[in-house]
Structures are given as structure tokens and as C-alpha cells.
């Protein structure tokens, strides 16, 4: 990740009049700094994947040299005034700082401390125990300097420590600047760290931004480090989302979960990325052999991962023969999950093929419960191409065209290769939502365009232009993602919202 540096220049609201002692000290010649900043970057820490654990600073490279603003105090040599006018001594990290309540009260934390509500209000020496292990001596010292100078360097590789300190001291402007830097520097190397820290410190915008980055990149940029850092709760949210950018079809999500679960069980595994899936298959084959056929998710080791796999949209996996065979052979998922779905799929097939009722023209479509089929594709360059998504609605002959910067749906698969038999009913009806996304080198979306859910009802050889990108600045590769909901044609009278969604497919 490239290093992003920022010198935060904040303008506080200075009091109308400074204490005379402070003004006298500001004019005095400054001596050497009482506390010198540590040389070099922050020492490497164990990456944390759970809330409440110490966060690893983002790997932004060496901290850039950032010059500090100067207040009436000469901060280049002594950040705090010296002499006998100090009215409070702060003791922390084995250091002592002779400071002034006047400056410290620019922090909401110290303002409350000295307002009479705390027992430390009248103390002249305060020993501070840091409530957050992410706060270190350097970040605390920088925060004290900020209270005197209204400026603070915030290099990305120090962002977590500074964020923790600013949160404790209630430095709202520093927190806002941390959010801006995190937004600009999010990448595969730090996205989980940022996400968990945003959870810890209540940064809802940063949490949303990281969550969206993961939805866009989990499948397209999967790597060992990223999969290791995603905990169960976060993975459950990602897999459940209909906004997850899926390449090809749903079975790819199952494959990613196998890799992820293996890395959670074997965090020290150090093979190559190409060997990861094979290593996972070997690992779970051994579990299968040792457990006498008990599905892995029902074993002691596997139960923790059950909530994640329950978010898989199994009906869109087992409607494809190779995928169904993989699910059966791996024996990760209990048969009790899968068997009822086969019955539902068979009945759905019969309804799709034998019913002639088209259903109402106008229906309310919702994917609130995450029942849509997720599929996608990648366009490497700006040239005409066509493709199909196999397995949808038992071979519904929908072809997707990219031509002249337009995405067009056409109903005709006569010349297309399909893994399933093609159903050629004269008219078929589905609801769909289409998205196109362009990502930059760091995985941040630079183009995002999407439709709402629309009901699609095409006869043979009919076309529908879905999205026009003529006036958009597209970066390739560009990703095309679609959510489909089959609209069953059971009757022509007042279908409810629930009936516009496929119950389990």
C-alpha cells in the first residue's frame, strides 16, 4: 500500500485571555523537548481480528516527515512551557508531564475531569491508566502537544493508535481527520483493521466504507491475509448481503468459504495462493475420514462456522450438477440442510415448466431477506461480448450482451453453450437488478451504477437495454453483477410481496 501522509491543521477556539504565566513562558527561550518521539515506525504487532483486541497499524511504510505548526510556544524544541506555573502533573507510560489545565481542557476528557465531577478535579498529580491497549506513549504525547498547538501529524501507519487516543480524550476534530485518512488509504492490507477499529470507536462512516470495500473485493481480490483477518461475525454479514460482488455464480462463494474456514483453523499455513484450495480440500477430507461421516459443520471444530454457511444460498448451488456433487463429496454441510431444498427445487421446476399463468404485470419486488440469485462477470476491455449465467431458473435462455457501452438482455440461447438444458417457454418472467462497478488499483469504486429491481418479461428473441454507459468514465476491468428473483406465475390476482420472491431459491 502506498503511504498517505497528512498533517492535520486544526483551528481551535482559543480562550479570550491566556493566563499570565502561560504568556510569560511562551516568551521564554525553549529548552530541549521533555519527551522525544521514538525513532522509526511503530513496532509490528499481532494482527487482531476481534473487537477489543489490539489493532495492528496499517502498513503504510515509514512515517513521512511532517513539519509541525507552531503556536506562541516554540514547539520545535519544547512542546510544553517550563517553570513553576504548571498547575497539574500528568503521569503515564512511566513519564511525567508538568502541564496546564487551561490547555488540557481543550479536550472533552480533561474538561470533564477538572469540572468537579471526578475525584481528580482538585489533584495536582494525576496518574493515568490507559483504558485502551491501542494507546501508546507516542500517540498520547502527540495528543498533549496538539492541545497546546492545535496541530498533529497523522501518518496512516500510526492511525489506530492516534484514533484510540483521540477517542479517549474526546478530540472530535482529530477523529474526523482520522476518518478522512482511513477513507483515502483503505486497501486489502488494512481494511479489516480499519473496520474493527471503526466498530470499537463508533466511526459509522468508516465502518460502512470498509464494509462496502469488502463487498466489492472479497471475491475479486481474495488473498490469504485478507481471508485470515475476516472474523466469523464479519464474514456472516458479507455472505448474507445481496450486494456482494459475485464472479460467475453462487458456488464460488462456497469455495471462498472453504478457503476461509481452513485458514481460520490453520492460521500458520504458509503455502502459495494456488495451493490454498487443494490444502483446504485435503484438510476437510481428513476431518471427514476421522469423524466417521459426520458433516464437518456439526463437529466440535466446525460449529463455530455454521452461522456463516447458513447464509449460503444453497438453491442456486445445488441446481448445477458439478456444484451439487461438490457439496455432497465435501460433506461440510449437513444433509438436513440440503434435502428439503431438492424437493422445493423440483416443485419449482414443475411450476416453471407447466404453469401458463404469467402473474400480475406490476408487482412489488423486495430482496430484503436475501433470496436473490447473485451472479456476475468481468469485462477486461471495451469490446463487444456476450455471456450467459448457467443454472438460473433451470436454463432460462437469457443472454447478456455488452455492445457500444450498453448492457443488453436478450432472450435467446440457441447459439450459446449452456451447462443445463434450455427452457424455451414462450414467455418467462423474473425480477432483476443490475450493477456495474469499476475499481481502481486499491479496490475503491470509481464508478458505480445500478438499477432498481425491475420485472423482466421477455418473449423469444426480445431485447431490453438495461444500462447505458456512453457518458461514463469507465475503468477496465469493469464488473457486471446481477441479482435475479424468479417471479412465479401462480395466479393473476393480487400476489403478495412474499410471493414475488422465490421462498428458498
Image (cartoon, grey):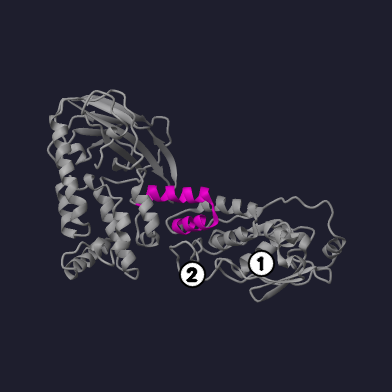
- Dot placed on the residue nearer the N-terminal end, 2 or 1: 2
Q: Residues within 10 Å of mark 1 (few under 14, many from 20)?
A: some
User: Dot 1: what SS?
Assistant: helix
Question: Could you say where residue 387 lies in the image, as x and y percent from the top left?
Answer: 23, 38
Residue 194 part of the magenta-drawn span: yes
Q: Residue 45 carries which label?
A: 2
Q: For residue 141, which numbered disc appears in the image? A: 1
Where does the image place residue 362, in percent across and percent down from the top left?
31, 24
Give the percent coordinates (x, y) of residue 61: 51, 63
Magenta span: chief secondary structure: helix
Please tell me whether residue 397 belongs to the stretch shown in magenta. no
Image height check: is 57 above or below 363?
below
Q: Is residue 25 left or right of residue 386?
A: right
Q: Quadrant of residue 471?
A: top left
Magenta span covers which residues? 191-218
Residue at horizontal 36%, vertical 59%? 227
Amino acid at each position: 500500500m502506498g503511504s498517505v501522509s497528512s498533517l492535520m491543521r486544526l483551528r481551535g477556539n482559543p480562550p479570550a485571555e491566556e493566563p499570565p504565566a502561560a504568556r510569560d513562558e511562551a516568551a521564554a527561550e525553549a529548552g530541549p523537548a521533555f519527551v522525544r518521539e521514538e525513532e522509526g515506525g511503530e513496532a509490528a504487532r499481532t494482527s487482531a481480528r476481534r473487537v477489543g483486541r489490539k489493532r495492528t497499524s496499517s502498513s503504510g511504510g515509514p512515517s513521512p516527515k511532517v513539519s509541525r505548526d507552531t503556536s506562541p510556544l516554540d514547539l520545535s524544541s519544547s512542546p510544553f512551557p517550563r517553570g513553576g506555573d504548571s498547575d497539574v502533573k500528568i503521569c503515564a507510560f512511566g513519564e511525567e508531564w508538568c502541564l496546564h489545565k487551561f490547555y488540557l481542557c481543550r479536550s472533552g476528557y480533561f474538561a470533564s475531569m477538572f469540572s468537579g465531577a471526578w475525584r481528580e478535579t482538585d489533584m495536582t498529580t494525576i496518574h493515568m491508566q490507559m483504558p485502551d491497549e491501542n494507546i501508546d506513549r507516542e500517540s498520547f504525547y502527540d495528543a498533549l502537544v496538539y492541545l497546546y498547538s492545535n496541530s498533529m501529524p497523522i501518518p496512516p501507519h500510526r492511525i489506530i493508535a492516534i484514533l484510540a487516543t483521540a477517542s479517549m480524550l474526546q478530540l472530535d476534530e482529530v477523529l474526523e481527520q482520522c476518518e478522512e485518512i482511513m477513507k483515502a488509504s483503505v486497501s486489502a492490507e488494512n481494511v479489516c483493521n480499519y473496520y474493527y477499529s471503526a466498530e470499537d470507536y463508533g466511526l459509522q462512516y468508516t465502518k460502512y466504507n470498509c464494509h462496502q470495500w469488502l463487498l466489492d473485493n472479497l471475491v475479486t481480490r481474495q488473498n490469504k491475509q485478507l481471508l485470515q483477518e475476516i472474523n466469523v461475525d464479519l464474514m456472516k454479514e458479507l455472505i448474507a448481503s445481496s450486494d456482494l460482488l459475485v464472479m460467475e455464480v453462487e458456488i464460488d462463494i462456497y469455495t471462498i468459504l472453504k478457503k476461509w474456514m481452513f485458514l481460520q483453523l490453520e492460521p500458520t499455513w504458509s503455502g502459495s495462493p494456488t495451493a490454498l484450495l487443494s490444502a483446504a480440500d485435503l484438510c476437510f477430507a481428513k476431518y471427514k475420514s476421522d469423524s466417521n461421516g459426520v458433516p464437518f459443520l456439526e463437529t466440535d471444530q466446525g460449529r463455530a462456522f455454521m452461522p456463516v454457511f447458513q447464509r449460503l444460498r444453497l438453491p442456486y448451488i445445488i441446481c448445477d450438477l458439478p456444484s451439487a456433487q461438490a457439496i455432497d463429496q465435501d460433506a461440510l454441510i449437513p444433509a438436513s440442510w440440503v434435502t428439503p431444498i431438492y424437493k422445493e427445487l423440483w416443485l419449482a421446476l414443475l411450476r416453471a415448466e407447466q404453469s401458463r399463468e404469467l402473474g400480475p404485470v406490476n408487482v412489488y419486488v423486495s430482496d430484503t431477506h436475501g433470496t436473490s440469485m447473485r451472479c456476475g462477470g468481468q469485462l477486461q476491455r471495451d469490446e463487444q461480448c456476450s455471456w450467459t449465467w448457467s443454472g438460473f431458473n433451470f436454463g432460462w435462455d437469457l443472454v447478456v450482451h455488452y455492445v457500444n457501452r450498453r448492457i443488453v438482455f436478450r432472450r435467446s440461447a440457441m447459439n450459446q453453450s449452456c451447462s443445463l438444458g434450455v427452457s424455451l417457454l414462450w414467455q418467462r418472467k423474473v425480477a432483476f437488478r443490475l450493477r456495474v462497478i469499476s475499481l481502481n488499483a486499491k479496490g475503491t469504486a470509481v464508478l458505480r451504477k445500478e438499477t432498481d429491481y425491475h420485472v423482466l418479461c421477455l418473449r423469444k428473441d426480445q431485447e431490453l437495454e438495461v444500462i447505458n454507459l456512453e457518458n461514463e468514465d469507465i475503468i477496465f476491468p469493469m464488473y457486471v453483477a446481477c441479482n435475479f428473483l424468479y417471479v412465479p406465475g401462480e395466479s393473476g390476482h393480487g400476489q403478495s410481496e412474499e410471493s414475488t420472491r422465490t421462498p428458498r431459491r
